[in-house]
Image: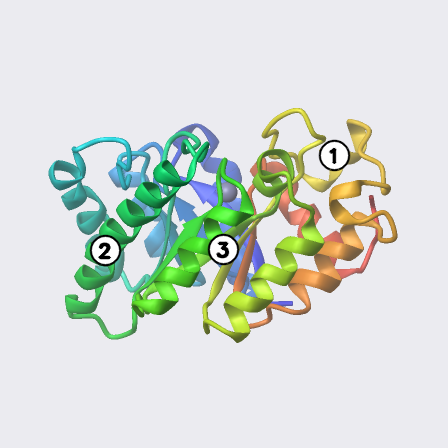
Amino acid sequence: MNNFGFKIIDDIKIEKEVFELIDYSNKNKLPMELAIYKEDKEMYERIIEKSQYLNTIHLSKNSKLYIAHKTFDQHKHIIFEEIKRGVSYGVYRFVLHPNDYNFNLSNTHYKDKIISLLIERLTEVNEFVNKLNSNKKVEIYIENMFDPIELFKELFKEIDNIKLDNINFCFDIGHAKVWSGTNLEEWIEFLDILKNKYNKKFHFHIHFNLGLGDQHLSFEEAVEQGMEDKDEYFSSSKKITDAIRNDLIDVYKDDTLVMEQNPKYQINGYEMMKNKKSVI
Ligand SMILES: [Zn+2]
């Protein structure tokens, strides 16, 4: 199960937990994602130097596609610099949010405009990484945030049409539950199309939300807070942890799945999955 690992952040306040996860990942050869949310340069370098299996960087909050603003030209260098820095340390996978807020998809005019702006900006990112002098192909993963599955269906159809080969998909299972209005089964059908028809790669964020908002709970916290194994989003015929293991971890063996949860619960979460414990 070496496609399932941890997501950490460059936060000095949780240094002990972060380096415990790095040691565990090094010992067990498990992938890691580093999110540069605090933009602590010293912590970034220490993490990258220590971690042997860190393969993904989540770009900072300043790395945005600025869809509703005219400021992309002024800010795109931030995205490019963060990618260049990661590549210089031997990291080739980067996660990027499409926007800070949900898009206005209330009518076709806005929806088409949003897709075309996303495509315009992703084309620039795609071209930038193509020109980078790197040893390996650089992969960008666009993460589902507040928007419905239809947006991603249309976006990736266009990405395939114009062959933006470096743009892939980061599926956040918790965001999909609380914001997309679409159940996991339908998302998995979409992932299937991305994989088999469009030849896309994946990154996964695994965490739990009871339903009201984006809580990023671990397996243990979800149980403690009353999550039950009958959850419509996961399909009532399956235990939640079984769905994650059987439908995601066991299927996307060549991709990377990370727990996007409080670091103190992540090792236990990994061991539960490894030992096939159905906790929820
Ligand atoms: Zn996420």
Please say if 107 is above or below 96.
Answer: above
Q: Mark number for residue 222? A: 1
The answer to whether the residues at label 3 and label 2 have Cβ atoms under 8 Å apart is no
* Front position among marks 2 and 1: 2
Q: Looking at the image, which residue is at 58% across and 30% down? A: 214
Secondary structure under tag 2 reads: helix
Quadrant occupied by the C terminus: top right
Q: Mark number for residue 153? A: 3
Q: Mark number for residue 191? A: none
Q: Looking at the image, which residue is at 43% across and 27% down? A: 13
Residue 78, given in percent of the width and then of the height, sits at 19, 42
Identify residue type, mark 3: Lys
Q: Pointer 2: what residue? A: 125
The residues bearing labels 1 and 3 have C-alpha atoms spaced at a distance of: 30 Å
As rendered, which of 238 and 258 lies closer to the eye? 238
Please say if 241 is above or below 100.
Answer: below
As rendered, which of 169 and 186 lies closer to the eye? 186
Please say if 248 is above or below 238.
Answer: below
Residue sitting farthest toward the front: 108
- Between discs 2 and 1, the one toward the N terminus: 2
Question: Is residue 24 in view from this perspective?
Answer: no
